[in-house]
Structure formats: C-alpha cells, structure tokens
Amino acid sequence: MISLNPDKAVYTLTGQTQGTTYTIKYIHASAIIDSISIQQILSDIDHSLSLYQPTSFISQFNKSSRGVKADVHLSNVVRNSLLVSNATNGCFDITVKPISMLWGFNAASPKSIPTLALLQKTSKFVGYHHVSFNRDSLIKDNPNTQIDCDGIAQGYTVDQLAWFVRNKGISDFMVEVGGEVYASGKNSAGSDWIIGIEGVEVYKGDNHFITKKISLSNKAVTTSGSMKKYRKLGNKYWSHIVDPSTAMPVDNGIVSVTVIGPDAITADAYDNAFMVMGINKAFALADSIKNMGLYLVYANKDGRISDTSNACFKQFLINQ
C-alpha cells in the first residue's frame, strides 16, 4: 500500500490464474476489494473456458457431437470471437485447436512435422463457420469441430476484473493478467498509467530485456507472439500461431504484435489476427479501425530485428 494523501491510497492484489499471474492496482480511500471475490470471478471463468477442466463448458462443447447450452462467459467470448473472425476473414479463428494440437501447441510436443495429408484431413472441420448460436446454445455442424479460446480468454478476464473494480465505484485502477492490461483513470501521481511492453530490444539479445513504455488511460494493451514461444521441429523454429487458411504456423517475419484498443478482449483477438495477416494487411486493417494502435516487431530478410507502429500507437509512446 502506497500512501497518496490522508484520503486515498494505492491497494494491490496479486495471485495465480490461467497458468500465469494477475495484478490489480486501485486507488481508493480503503481496501474494498478482497482476494476471495477476485478468485471467485477467476474460478467462474475457468469453469467456463478452461481446456484443462474436463467439466468446463468449453470442454463439454469440444466433447459433444452437436453442442452445449452456453454460460455467459462462453457465450460472450465466442460471440466476440466470431465478430473478429468475420472482420479479419478468418485470420482469427477459435476452431483452429485441432491443427494447433498437431503442431504441438496445447498438447505434448510432436516428434515430427505433421504430414500434408493429416493437415488437410483436419482442416475439413476447422473454420469459424462451423460454429453458431441457436438462442443460448452454442452448436457446431461437424462433430469433430473443437474450439480453443486461449487467444482471447486472458483479454476477456482482464475486462471482467475491470468491470468488477469499476462497479465498486473505483475509477482509477489497472488490471493485468499474463501481460494483458486494462488501465482506467490515473495512477498515484495523477498521470496516465505507465505500461511496459516488449520492444525490439528484447529480441536482440537474451541479456537485454529492455521494454518500451506507453501511457494509458481508459484503454487496453495486449501482446501476441514472442521468440520465447517458438517451437523447434527438425532444424527450423515454428511460431505457436497457426494460420487457419493454410494449417501452417505463420512464417511472415512478424515476431510479436502489440495492440492498443478500447477493451482487452478486442485487443487480444486482433493481436492474434495481425500475427497471421502479415505486416501490410495488419496495418491496413488497424488503420481502418477507430483508435486502434498497432506495434510490430519483425525480422527482416537478412535476419535483423526491426519494429514499426502506426500513428495511433505512437500517440501513447513515452520518449526514452
């Protein structure tokens, strides 16, 4: 707890969730948020979206031949996912799970690269068009279709925690889950919140973990991709992001994508889509969306690591 003045202080809650950590900082006259309430929210989300819980709603859907009655969390996440899938021509697609598993993501590491025949066979039941809603039921038209919401779940969790904090009458706070952030109002110094992100310097050497900094208020920032998430098969490193249209890990030079958006679920979905799109298409789409900031770290043809950002993102950068 950091004292600001006789009336307000900064309170911090931290813990474990979704295989990572969370942090909540808020400014208020007293500690009105307890860890038990936060854990209940996180538990409810896990019971809906966790692939590691056999009884979760998403696990029930994946095991079903037709579908399930969706709870509010699964419904919210899938509906938002389908919106972004349509907006990105399927570059973001939660049904890519079976292909990701063939490549060893969200599963045991494969001993070899999947065959073309196996990828083509699996691709027949991959595609967001296989998933739809019938009132409050999430249904699929192919019994083999499965979904994985990990590319959007952390962003959604950030938004749910932010909603909870705001409904407590708190306007100045920051919520972070696994590096995905939503910042509201001002920090203890009365300024926008200062958020560190992985800049190009991170990828130039293991011992130089330098971040860029942005100032953020009433917006979210999320990042997808990292050299730390690449998998080696044979003599080549493969990205953990799969292109749904080719069933192959992306190989377009993009190392990581950071997105600033109005909320974390939106930014989290688009950062995955931009990884798949490639640099030019990613910037074209980001610039067509109001108030969406985009920052890319990418490898040049000669192997050098560079970065670039759009005009919206540059507004938030802090000169270092």
Image (spheres, grey):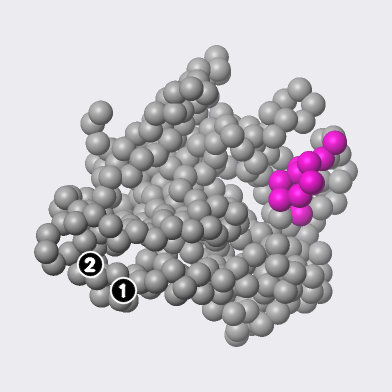
- At 67% from the left and 74% from the top, the residue drawn is 57
Residue 200: percent from the left, percent from the top? 43, 27
Q: CA distance from mark 2 to mark 1?
A: 8 Å
Instruction: Specify the label residue 32 is tagged with.
Output: 1
The answer to whether the residues at label 2 and label 1 have Cβ atoms under 8 Å apart is: yes
Which corner quadrant of the image does residue 149 belong to?
bottom right
Q: Is residue 79 above or below residue 201?
A: below
Q: Residues within 10 Å of mark 1 (few under 14, many from 20)?
A: few
Bounds of the magenta segment: 98-111
Residue situated in front as seen by the camera: 56 or 306: 56
Residue situated in front as seen by the camera: 45 or 129: 45
- At 63% from the left and 43% from the top, the residue drawn is 241
Residue type at mark 2 is His
Residue 232: percent from the left, percent from the top? 72, 30
- At 60% from the left and 54% from the top, the residue drawn is 19
* Element carrying mark 1: loop
Q: Is residue 47 above or below residue 90?
A: below
Residue 286 lies within the magenta run: no
Residue 163 in view, yes or no: no
Write down the residue under mark 2.
Answer: 28
Residue situated in front as seen by the camera: 211 or 32: 32
Residue 36 in view, yes or no: yes
Q: How many marks?
A: 2
